[in-house]
Amino acid sequence: MRGYNDSVPLSGAAGATSVAAFPTPSSKSNSSAEALKQEVIKREVLEGDKADGARKKVAKAAGKMLRIRKEKEEHEAAGSGSVVVTPCGSR
């Protein structure tokens, strides 16, 4: 008679699925650690100080491009075919 802790060899498809359904603790902890690491990196990229600075730069550049486009359209609507673009500030 076999006891509760005696190992029983698994064969066939049932053995393969039970191994896949219950990963070893080391692989589970590695995947959890990797997922946590990826989440921290993602949060730093999206919410960090450098991300705020990048958002401000993009907003400033987008505003500048919209002003240039608007000036160009107004200038063309006035009948002049030439467009003069002057820089707004020096860097």
Image (tube, helix red, strand yellow):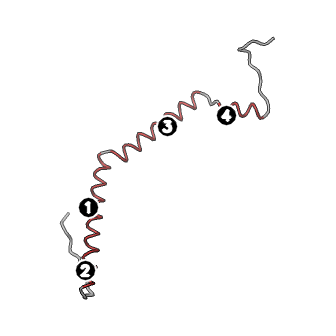
> Disc 3 or disc 1, which is closer to the eye?
1
Residue identified by numbered label 3 = 34
For residue 1, the mark is none
> Disc 3 or disc 4, which is closer to the eye?
4
Residue identified by numbered label 4 = 20
Residues 70 and 2: in front is 70
Mark 4 and mark 3 in contact (Cβ < 8 Å)? no
> Disc 4 or disc 2, which is closer to the eye?
2
* Secondary structure of residue under mark 2: helix
> Disc 2 or disc 3, which is closer to the eye?
2
Name the N-terminal-most of marks 2 and 3: 3
Residue identified by numbered label 1 = 60
Q: Identify whether 7 is placed above or below 63.
A: above
Alpha carbon separation for disc pair 4 and 2? 66 Å
Name the N-terminal-most of marks 3 and 1: 3
Q: What x and y, as percent, mark residue 60?
A: 26, 61
Name the N-terminal-most of marks 4 and 2: 4
Quarter of the picture holding the N terminus: top right
Quarter of the picture holding the C terminus: bottom left
Q: What x and y, as percent, mark residue 17?
A: 71, 34
Using a 10 Å C-alpha cutoff, classify the residue at mark 3 as few (fewer than 14 neighbours), some (14 to 19) or many (20 or more).
Answer: few
Using a 10 Å C-alpha cutoff, classify the residue at mark 4 as few (fewer than 14 neighbours), some (14 to 19) or many (20 or more).
Answer: few
Alpha carbon separation for disc pair 3 and 1? 36 Å
For residue 74, the mark is 2
Residue 82 lies left or right of residue 43; in this view the side is: left
Which amino acid, mark 1?
Lys
